[in-house]
């Protein structure tokens, strides 16, 4: 049989086996640490007292804590994403247009905090924003306010810290996209009579939109699952999906409920990626192109 | 008739424009006057400053000193979008997210021209570059030559007072390039526009230009008609850059003749007074003659080293006894073949005094 195959087919087969061999460790890790636990999670979410049940999912319709938590989480995600776009776009724009060493410096300032633990950064914000923190005492000393502002232990504090932590996920894809926009396009726009604003709105902005979509998806999805900042800075008032999951396990030991919440959140994330991939190719969201 | 007309064709005057980057002189005291409706090429090797000069005209580079006038108007400090100059960029710089019509009408939208006037203008511009009916096409669906035409239509639709082109044909293959050269020339005549054309291709510049400005190291070396550049180069740089020329070092004898290793060459034009002169030998200026004996004026004798058959012509390479290599062409016909010599044979050639060009070295 095999003698009738031509050499190139044989060669291809051998190459295919080699590729499979090289991929095996990665596939094992992904399979063992991701796929299997996910299946287990899905299994847990439909089990109760040794039998099949949809009770865990039914709670989304009956228990208003559930849908209010989801609402709160999505609200956070929208606010944080919007704020990172507004804050990140100008930074990426300046970095992409600056001479090389300046853009490196700007990106370094964005990325450096990224290498510090999220926990450390969350506590740092707590110190800055608390009642007698740096921000409040500075504002009081300047006579701008009489009473300390409530900057932390609420949604505002959570939002501020989350924005700070997730900003690089917006700036980096934006920068990558903007940097690839050829400068002669904006030069051409100007030579054809476009004012700087007109050229920005008609040429630069539309061409940078894939970066906005990529950053939006990353920040939005990461915010949906964020845990540390709402836990530390939310003061119990900002209740997010991740906290609902942890409470169910830590306090009530309810694996079924926790699993069903996780699965619903996972489905939401899939839907968001699906939606975004209608706008730009999936590889671009992940920064592969 | 439905066609674009340039409002008021004006000339360009550049007065002692310089550009320094630190201590590096990208442009050194450029003076250039381009008449209304003239087609001027800026020709030079890469790094000679031609792109900087284009940047100064377009308003993307601020000159360190000097002025630029468009007609009577001083535009030295005007931003690019107020200059009314249509630019065709090297890689066309078409907007990839817009279709052909959106690209071409970009200048109309930017100028807030009433939308009612767009369709007529768009049609005229697309017809001009023979792309009628291509309005809805996406840019990535077009060939290189078509993109080139869209860029042209976009640069002309707002009837600019000057059209600048930065190596617009360099991305095209040879055949298309030659077709587009002729089309651009026709377009220039139709529009009667002032055009400044940047290129590093001497043949392109010779074919298309009314005048050519040769640049080297940030300076304008010579600004002249193609014929005069070819036959009256000011120095060895221009002579070496234009045409198929060999440069041979010669010694000045008197103001009408030079000495090449014992052979006297008489010129019908004055020989420059400089210790290091070069004889410019264009291959088409050499004529094969019966051997008239060594030492006769304007006769060179050598040994054939190689003959190359090139279809329409045959190129003969030969070495003078001093070792310098020259070449000439004979037509690929019966008479030409009769003149052929085999490698190793002796060959005698003559240069007419009118064709004897002697130049000083480049500054």
Image (tube, coloured by chain):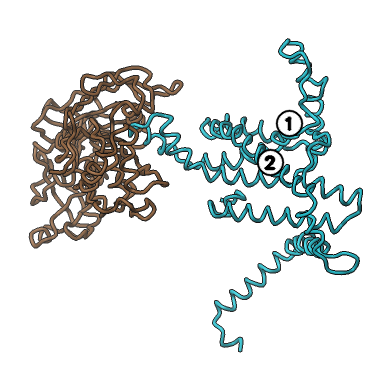
Classify mark 2: helix, strand or loop: helix
Residue B167 percent location from the top left of the image? 31, 41
- Taking the spot 30% from the left edge, 50% from the top edge, the residue there is B135
Classify mark 1: helix, strand or loop: helix
Residue A38 percent location from the top left of the image? 78, 61
Reading the image, the residue beneath label 1 is: A156
Reading the image, the residue beneath label 2 is: A75
Q: Note whether B233 is above or below B318 in the view shown.
A: above
- Tell me whether marks 1 and 2 sit on the same chain: yes
- Taking the spot 78% from the left edge, 18% from the top edge, the residue there is A148
Query: In the rendered structure, the residue with mark 1 lies on which chain?
Result: A
Q: Earlier in the sequence, mark 1 or mark 2?
A: 2
Screen quadrant of the C terminus of chain B: top left
Residue at the limit of the structure toward the bottom, as seen here: A1
Residue A201 percent location from the top left of the image? 45, 35
Chain shown in brown: B
Q: Can the viewer see residue B259 in this picture? A: no
């Amino acid at each position: 049989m095999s003698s009738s195959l031509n050499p190139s087919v044989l060669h291809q087969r051998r190459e295919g086996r080699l590729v499979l061999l090289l991929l095996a460790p990665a596939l094992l890790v992904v399979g063992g640490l991701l796929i299997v636990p996910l299946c287990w999670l899905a299994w847990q979410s439909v089990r109760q007292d040794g039998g099949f049940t949809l009770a865990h999912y039914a709670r989304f319709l009956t228990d208003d804590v559930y849908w209010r938590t989801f609402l709160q989480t999505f609200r956070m995600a929208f606010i944080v994403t919007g704020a990172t776009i507004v804050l990140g776009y100008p930074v990426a724009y300046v970095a992409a247009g600056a001479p090389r060493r300046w853009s490196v410096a700007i990106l370094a300032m964005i990325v450096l905090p990224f290498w510090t633990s999220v926990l450390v950064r969350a506590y740092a914000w707590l110190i800055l924003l608390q009642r007698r923190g740096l921000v409040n005492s500075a504002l009081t000393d300047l006579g701008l306010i009489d009473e300390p502002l409530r900057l932390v232990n609420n949604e505002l504090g959570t939002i501020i810290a989350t924005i700070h932590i997730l900003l690089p996920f917006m700036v980096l894809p934006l920068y990558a996209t903007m940097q690839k926009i050829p400068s002669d396009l904006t030069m051409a726009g100007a030579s054809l009579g476009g004012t700087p604003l007109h050229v920005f709105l008609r040429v630069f902005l539309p061409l940078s939109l894939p970066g906005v979509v990529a950053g939006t998806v990353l920040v939005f999805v990461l915010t949906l699952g964020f845990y540390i900042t709402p836990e530390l800075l939310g003061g119990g008032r900002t209740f997010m999906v991740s906290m609902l999951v942890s409470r169910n396990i830590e306090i009530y030991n309810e694996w079924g409920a926790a699993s069903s919440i996780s699965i619903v959140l996972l489905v939401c994330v899939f839907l968001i990626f699906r939606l975004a991939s209608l706008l730009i190719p999936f590889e671009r969201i992940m920064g592969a192109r | 008739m439905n066609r674009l007309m340039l409002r008021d064709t004006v000339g360009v005057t550049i007065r002692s424009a310089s550009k320094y980057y630190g201590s590096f002189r990208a442009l050194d005291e450029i003076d250039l006057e381009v008449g209304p409706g003239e087609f001027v090429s800026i020709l030079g090797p890469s790094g000679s400053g031609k792109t900087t000069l284009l940047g100064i005209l377009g308003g993307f580079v601020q000159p360190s000193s000097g002025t630029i006038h468009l007609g009577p108007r001083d535009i030295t400090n005007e931003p690019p979008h107020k200059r009314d100059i249509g630019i065709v960029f090297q890689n066309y710089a078409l907007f990839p997210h817009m279709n052909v019509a959106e690209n071409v009408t970009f200048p109309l939208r930017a100028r807030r021209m009433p939308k009612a006037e767009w369709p007529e203008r768009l049609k005229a511009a697309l017809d001009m570059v023979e792309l009628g009916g291509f309005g809805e096409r996406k840019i990535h669906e077009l060939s290189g030559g078509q993109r080139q035409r869209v860029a042209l239509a976009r640069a002309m639709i707002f009837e600019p007072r000057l059209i600048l082109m930065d190596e617009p044909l360099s991305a095209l293959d040879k055949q298309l390039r030659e077709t587009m050269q002729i089309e651009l020339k026709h377009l220039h005549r139709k529009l009667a526009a002032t055009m400044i054309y940047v290129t590093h291709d001497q043949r392109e510049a010779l074919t298309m230009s009314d005048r050519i400005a040769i640049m080297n190291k940030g300076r304008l070396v010579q600004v002249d008609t193609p014929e005069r550049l070819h036959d009256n180069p000011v120095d060895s740089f221009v002579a070496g850059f234009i045409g198929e020329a060999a440069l041979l070092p010669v010694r000045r004898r008197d103001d009408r003749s030079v000495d090449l290793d014992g052979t006297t060459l008489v010129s019908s034009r004055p020989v420059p007074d400089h210790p290091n002169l070069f004889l410019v030998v264009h291959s088409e200026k050499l004529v094969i003659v019966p051997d008239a004996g060594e030492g006769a004026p304007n006769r060179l004798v050598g040994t054939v080293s190689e003959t190359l058959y090139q279809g329409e012509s045959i190129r003969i390479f030969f070495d003078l006894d001093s070792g310098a290599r020259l070449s000439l062409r004979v037509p690929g016909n019966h008479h030409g073949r009769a003149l052929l010599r085999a490698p190793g044979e002796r060959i005698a050639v003559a240069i007419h005094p009118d064709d004897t060009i002697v130049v000083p070295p480049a500054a």
